[in-house]
Structures are given as structure tokens and as C-alpha cells.
Image (spheres, grey):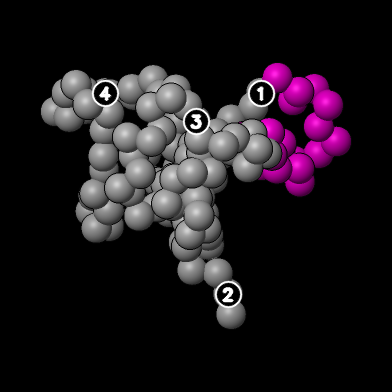
Amino acid sequence: MKDLGFELIYPPGIDRQDANLRPPLSLEVLPQFNEADSAIVLGYNFKDSSQLEGMEDFQERQLSGIEKSWQKNAIAQSLDASKAGRVYFIPAYLCLGLPGPIGTELYLKELETQLLPSQ
């Protein structure tokens, strides 16, 4: 993400040098990120994968609950990025389940689709 020009921000007290860092975040910490122009939320939901009718709705199932929770949460909605409509939801399996160039390409394609919608 840094190579694309994004500046990553971290919660206070987190060692930014730790390459394997995946800091836990709670809703209460979100206001500390209000300075962010945009937010990218990686989401997943494997709980109801047995209810999938096909692969067509796999990605929607991964993100729908997270997006709904974000929309209903007053703290999340108070962020400037939310108010500006710059919160993007990406299925985590693109990064975590497909490490390497293929996953990176899929992740970047999804991010491009959301950041640069067709006109």
C-alpha cells in the first residue's frame, strides 16, 4: 500500500517496524484514526459458508455483515472518511488466503474497482 502512495497509520504505542503486525482494533480506538482520508477495511465471514448457494455470493457474504455493522455504528460513522464516503471494504481472503502475486493482483484490482468506479 505504501508503494501506491498510501500512508499507513497505526494506533498509538504500536511498533510500526514489526512487519508481521496485525494490531487488534476496537470500535473505541477508531476516533484516533479520524485524520485518515480513507479507510480500507479487510473483512471476512466464514461462519455461514455452508449456506452458500454458489461462488457468486461468496464475496458478498464475506463483507455484508461488516458493512452493515459499520453503517449502524455511530463511532464508525463519526469518522471523516465515513462522512466523505471513503471507506472501502475488501474481502480479507484476497490478501490472507492468497499470499503472493496472485492475491496481490486480485486485491489491487478490487481496490481499483472501488476507488475508481466506472463512469
Distance (Cα) linking label 4 and label 1? 23 Å
| Mark 4 or mark 1, earlier in chain | 4
Q: Which residue is mark 4?
A: 20
Q: Amino acid at mark 4?
A: Asn
Q: Which residue is mark 1?
A: 46
**Badge 2 vs badge 4, beta-carbon distance below 8 Å:** no
Distance (Cα) linking label 1 and label 2? 30 Å
Farthest residue, direction left = 17
Q: Residue at x 33, y 22 (%)?
A: 23
| Mark 1 or mark 2, earlier in chain | 1
Q: Residue at x 41, y 33 (%)?
A: 30
Q: Residue at x 44, y 37 (%)?
A: 95
Distance (Cα) linking label 1 and label 3? 12 Å
Distance (Cα) linking label 3 and label 2? 28 Å
Above or below, 35 relative to 17: below
Q: Is residue 90 visible?
A: no
Q: Residue at x 27, y 23 (%)?
A: 20
| Mark 3 or mark 2, earlier in chain | 3
Q: Nearer the viewer, mark 3 or mark 2?
A: 2
**Span colored in magenta:** 47-67
Q: Which residue is mark 2?
A: 118
| Mark 3 or mark 4, earlier in chain | 4
**Badge 1 vs badge 3, beta-carbon distance below 8 Å:** no
Q: Is residue 17 left or right of residue 22?
A: left
For disc 3, the neighbor class at 10 Å (few under 14, some 14 to 19, many from 20) is few
Q: Which residue is mark 3?
A: 97
